[in-house]
Amino acid sequence: MAAHIQQQILAALAATLVAAGTAAGASVYVDHPDELTAAMLPAIVITCGPEQIESVGYGFPFGQTRTLQVDIISVATGTNAAAASRALAGEVESALYASETTARLGGLAKSPILLQSADPNITGQASQVIAEVRQSWQVLAQTLSGAPTVAT
C-alpha cells in the first residue's frame, strides 16, 4: 500500500533538501523525536503539524482539499550558531522555491507551498549554544475521499 499523502509530502521535502546540498548535507530528519547531538549538526528537522480537510464536490467519492502545516527546523551549533541557523533556513527556502515543480513537490501539492512564518530560538551556553529557525510551511494537497494515498 502506498504511503499516506502526509508521509509522501514529508518524504518529498526531505529528498528535496538532501538533493539541494545545504549545509546540513544528509542530516535531514523527518519526525525525529530525540534530541539532536552536536555531532548531528547542522541539521534540518521536518515535522508534520495539523491538517485541515475540506470536502469538495458532491456525490461519492468526493474530493478533499487537505491543508497541511509542516515545520522545517534549521539547527546549528557553535560560536556563530544563530547566523548559521539563519543561513541554513535561507538555504531551505531557496531549495524549496528553486522552481515551480519543486514548490509543488513534484505534483503532490495543488499549488506552490507557502512559507508562513519563521521563528528563531537560541539556547545553551558558551560552547554549547544551539540555535534554530523554525519555519512554518503550508502545503495544499487534494485527494479523493477514502483514498488518502493518491494526490489528485
Image (cartoon, grey):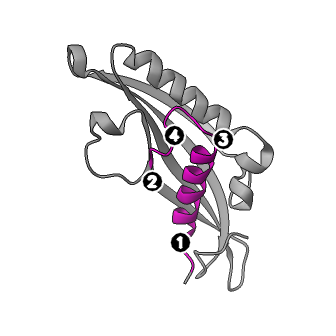
Q: Nearer the viewer, residue 119 or 73?
A: 73
Instruction: Find numbered disc 4 in the image and state the secondary structure of the residue it sits on.
Output: loop
Instruction: Look at 68% across and 61% down and name the residue there.
Output: 108
Q: Which residue is mark 2?
A: 48
Where residue 41 appears, as percent x and y from the top left, is 37, 34
Instruction: Look at 68% across and 78% down and name the residue there.
Output: 62
Quadrant housing the C terminus: bottom right
Task: Compute the Cα span from label 1 to label 3.
Answer: 21 Å
> Do labels 1 and 2 touch, CB within 8 Å?
no
Q: Which residue is mark 4?
A: 25
Dot 1 amino acid type? His
Task: Compute the Cα span from label 2 to label 4.
Answer: 21 Å
Q: Residues within 10 Å of mark 2 (few under 14, many from 20)?
A: some
Q: Residues within 10 Å of mark 1 (few under 14, many from 20)?
A: few
The residue stretch that appears in magenta: 2-28
Q: Which mark is residue 96?
A: 3
Q: Is residue 25 above or below residue 143?
A: above
Q: Is residue 90 left or right of residue 126?
A: right
Instruction: Find numbered disc 1 in the image and state the secondary structure of the residue it sits on.
Output: loop
Quarter location, residue 110: bottom right
Dot 4 amino acid type? Gly
Q: Which residue is mark 1?
A: 4
Quarter location, residue 40: top left
